[in-house]
Amino acid sequence: MEHIRNFCIIAHIDHGKSTLADRLIQYTNTLSERDFHDQVLDNMDLEKERGITIKSHAIQMLYQYQNIDYIFNLIDTPGHVDFSYEVSRAIAACEGALLVIDATQGIQAQTISNLYQAVDHGLEIIPVLNKMDMPSAMPDEVKDQIVDLIGCSRDDIIESSAKTGMGVELILEKIVSAIPPPQGDPDAPLQALIFDSVFNSFRGIFAYFKIVNGRIRTGDHVKFVNMNNDYHADEIGVMKIKYEPCRMLQAGNVGYIISGIKSARDVKVGDTITHYDKPCDKAIEGFLEVKPMVFAGLYPVEADDYEELRASIEKLQLNDASLSFVPESSVALGFGFRCGFLGLLHMEIVQERLDREFDMDVVTTVPNVSYKVFTTKGEEIEVHNPSGLPDQSLIHIIEEPYIEAQIICQADYVGSIMKLCIEKRGVLKNQVYLTTNRIEITFEMPLAEIVFDFYDKLKSISKGYASFDYHYTGFKQANLVRLDILLNGDMVDALSSLIHRDNAYAFGRRICEKLKELIPRQQFEIAIQAAIGSKIIARETVKALRKDVTAKCYGGDITRKRKLLEKQKKGKKRMRQIGNVEVPQTAFLAVLKLD
């Protein structure tokens, strides 16, 4: 155990985390030059294109320092806010962290939130200033920020460039000297923390774990404490670039276990593995059931593809346990599924993967969050969809989820960012100047307000400089109403939304105006109305296409024209009774991009 070092890399998106991991792998000769390629640990095409880590990875490297062989376990973490629970479990499996900060950009919001988690878990932090080879690097300014943030001395900060390899040797030596070896008792009952799992279509689920106490051997009868399932360890081993089976692993080691588990739902991140016969006294703390935060309907573009879409989502769920779905139907869109996602990025990734891996075209309804409704009878109902809301007369109060948002930006943009947050019903909690020109603003806001377009607006207001991170704080009472859209008196359920009463009138008017542009004209008049309950709050009319039936009357008595017009009027009336309004696909998407 003295020669094991478990560590993770904490960094904001695009600060060079994957590139630094590549260099560490190269310098420790974990991979031959022939097999090496950029972003070795990111094995999804999507990750490479967007330059983000979606699924965390772990890899074991061997490093020789002063003639002693050390085992390095790099437990990679996703950087995005949607996956913050996975990040917290990966951090819990480490004893140290490399804090990588871009010398051209300075400290960003996600760096800070993940750093706080690492400090809470008592990790040893090694600050690394990356991208020092860039002409726009500001080392002195960024070093001041790091010293203010973690209270280290300026000499502790390692200057490096993951691209050129500068400073990588220093980082490796620092990992050996600064990060403590894992603590644990190899002779105690087995206690191992699951920090990730991946799905293999031939062997089932590979669960990645770190052993806190005890030891595990191939063939052992093990139990997953929180899920209360027991399995036999068919194979255990360590993660190099490929999986390497071992006979035994003991306290301090990081490895994988294969036990013939078919579904990702049976393996929960944060669960504890112990022996079935000699279990440990208590599970490792911090286990949570991951709850979806954002809900949206996914419908096939062609109604015949419904079963195919179900099969695709089920396959996707095999290696993404945080995706949940239930069937639902809509009058406008037919049959589909109501899916729960961890956040907006997660939703985007699921849509993209459905398109790429399964070639499925889907229509997505407006994303919304889950609400708690307390009825006058004293019942509590969880509502994920506006159409599931009980009648207005039965509602006592509605509660909606709130978040605490941290925004780091340059001082020039503070005014416009505050204006944006206040428009989104935010309440200013705190503001701190990190340096003379950088400020951290903390707002309390409803989650429903940021699931739409908040991030895009924030980026455009701040010219891309502001960084944003949030965490969930709980439910609060809200004055919400259901806004329905009616076409010729018929409700279009896919366009319904739950919205704050103060914003409902303006939002209703804008939707009606937008739909008027998008719905094609028919041979009869179409009334587009926005309603709260039975009260109409906005209306637009799509005029009917008209044929000039009086063109053939050249003069003569007015009654001849009147007769033709009356005849046309009757035809229109009959048409309206049997005609139906087609809502084009663009109308559903336009609601998302109203501004």
Image (cartoon, grey):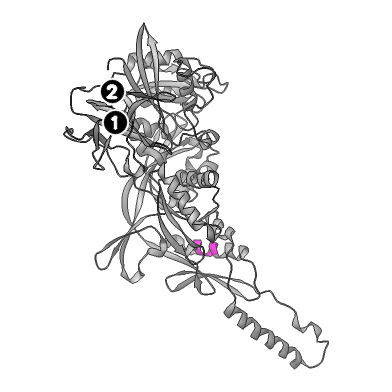
Residue under the image location 35 percent in, 20 percent down: 152
Q: Amino acid at mark 1?
A: Asp
Task: Judge left or right: residue 508 versus residue 234.
Answer: right
Image coordinates for residue 538, horizontal then vertical, percent:
52, 69
Name the residue beneath numbered marker 2. 248
Q: Amino acid at mark 2?
A: Met
The quadrant holding residue 66 is: top left
Q: Nearer the viewer, residue 118 or 221?
A: 221
Is residue 291 highlighted in magenta?
no
The answer to whether 9 is drawn above or below residue 498 in the figure is above
Q: Nearer the viewer, residue 358 or 65?
A: 358
State the count of labels.
2
Q: Nearer the viewer, residue 560 or 150?
A: 560
Q: Split into 4 quadrants, where in the image is the C terminus?
A: bottom right
Point out the residue furthest to the top here. Answer: 67
Q: Earlier in the sequence, mark 1 or mark 2?
A: 1
Image coordinates for residue 113, horizontal then vertical, percent:
37, 34
The answer to whether 409 is drawn above or below residue 369 in the figure is above
The quadrant holding residue 193 is: top left
Magenta region: which residues? 507-511
Callout 2 crowding tier (Cα within 10 Å): few <14, some 14–19, many ≥20: few
Label 1 vs label 2, nearer the camera: 2
Image coordinates for residue 171, horizontal then vertical, percent:
42, 16
Q: Secondary structure at mark 2?
A: strand
Q: Secondary structure at mark 1?
A: helix
Q: Tell me, for residue 120, which label it has, or none.
A: 1
Q: Split into 4 quadrants, where in the image is the N terminus?
A: top left
Residue under the image location 37 percent in, 64 percent down: 389
Callout 1 crowding tier (Cα within 10 Å): few <14, some 14–19, many ≥20: few
